[in-house]
Amino acid sequence: MSLFSSGDVATFKADRLLRAAQTYWPGVTLSDDYLLLQMQAAEATIAQRLRVFLEPTVVFPYTPSDAEVSALGGAAWAEEPGYDYDPTFFSAGRWGYIITRQKPIVSVEFIRFAYPSPQSAFFSIPDAWIRVDKKHGQINLVPAAASFAAPLNAFMLQAVGGGDMVPFMLQVKYTAGIQNVKSDPRWANLLDVILKQAVLGVLEENFTPQSGSISADGLSQSLSLDMEKCRDMIEMKLFGPKGSNGGLWTAIHGLGLGIIGSTP
C-alpha cells in the first residue's frame, strides 16, 4: 500500500515539479508511471528514516494466513515476533508493561500468551485489562472486574523458564502508524517533506547539473542548483537543525535521551 496513487501525479507535476522541469530539463517528458514510482520511493525513504508506518498498518505477531490478509481488504500489514515474558511481568510496579516495536498505536486487537509454541494453546488477556499510551507505544495490563484464568501459574513459569524470561511468549496484534497524512493539517509538514524528497529524487535521477549556462544571440542565462542544500533542507525537517533534538522525528517519537558516563 502507498499514500499515493496515479490520481496524485497530475497535482505533483503542477504543484511541485513544473518549475524544476521548465528550468532544468525543458522539452523532456516524464511518464506518469515514472513520477508515481518516485513519489512512492520518497514515501518509503521517509518512512524508513523516521522508522514509522505512514499509514495504519496491522501488525501480526505471527505469519498471517491468506484468509487473514484477504480479510484486511487491502490494508497494509507487517509481521513481527512476540515479546518476551519474564517472572516480573505481573509484579508490583510493572503492571504487565510492554513497549511495542511500532508506534503510534491506533488500536490493540489482542494480547495473548502462546506457550510452549505458537500453534498450541492461547490464553487471551481480557480487553478490559489493556491500558494503552498510543503516542509512545506503551501498554500496561491492569486487572479489572473481568475474570481471567492465568495460562500458567508463577511456579510453573519459574520451573519451566528457570526463573528467567520465556522468549516470544507474549503475542500482541495491533494496528500502528500515522493516520491521515494527506488530509490531517497536523501532518502537513510530513507530507511536504515526502514531496520534497520526491522532487529531489527526480532531479538526481535525471542527472541535473549543479550549474550551467545557456547562450544564444547575445543572450545568456545561468543556472545553479545545490543538491546538498536540498538534502540539508530535508534533513532539517526530519531531525531539526544540526545539534538540536527536534523535527518530525521528535514529533513522532518524543525527545531523544543519551546518557554519557564512565566506569570506575
Image (cartoon, rainbow, N blue to C red):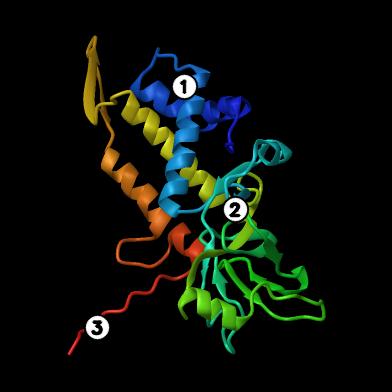
Residue type indicated by callout 3: Gly
Farthest top residue? Answer: 217
How far from the left and from the top, in percent, is residue 2? Answer: 57, 37
* Count of numbered labels shown in the rendering: 3
Give the labeled residue for mark 1. 34
Q: Is residue 197 left or right of residue 231?
A: right
First-in-chain label (1 vs 3): 1
Q: Is residue 58 in sight in this rendering?
A: yes
What residue do we see at 67% from left, 60% from top? 121
Q: Is residue 128 left or right of residue 160?
A: right
| Nearer-the-camera pick, 50 or 26 | 50
Give the labeled residue for mark 2. 178
Residue type indicated by callout 1: Tyr
What residue do we see at 54% from left, 30% from top? 12
Residue type indicated by callout 2: Ile
Circle 3: element type: loop
Instruction: Determine the CA span between mark 3 and mark 2.
Output: 35 Å
Give the labeled residue for mark 3. 261
Q: Residues within 10 Å of mark 3 (few under 14, many from 20)?
A: few
Q: Quadrant of the N terminus?
A: top right
Q: Residues within 10 Å of mark 2 (few under 14, many from 20)?
A: some
How far from the left and from the top, in percent, is residue 21? Answer: 41, 23
First-in-chain label (3 vs 2): 2
Which of the two discs, 1 and 3, sits closer to the camera? 3
Q: Determine the image quadrant of residue 125.
A: bottom right
Q: Is residue 86 in sight in this rendering?
A: no
First-in-chain label (2 vs 1): 1
Q: Determine the image quadrant of residue 82.
A: bottom right
Q: Is residue 147 left or right of residue 257?
A: right
Circle 1: element type: helix
| Nearer-the-camera pick, 99 or 14 | 99
What residue do we see at 71% from left, 65% from top? 124
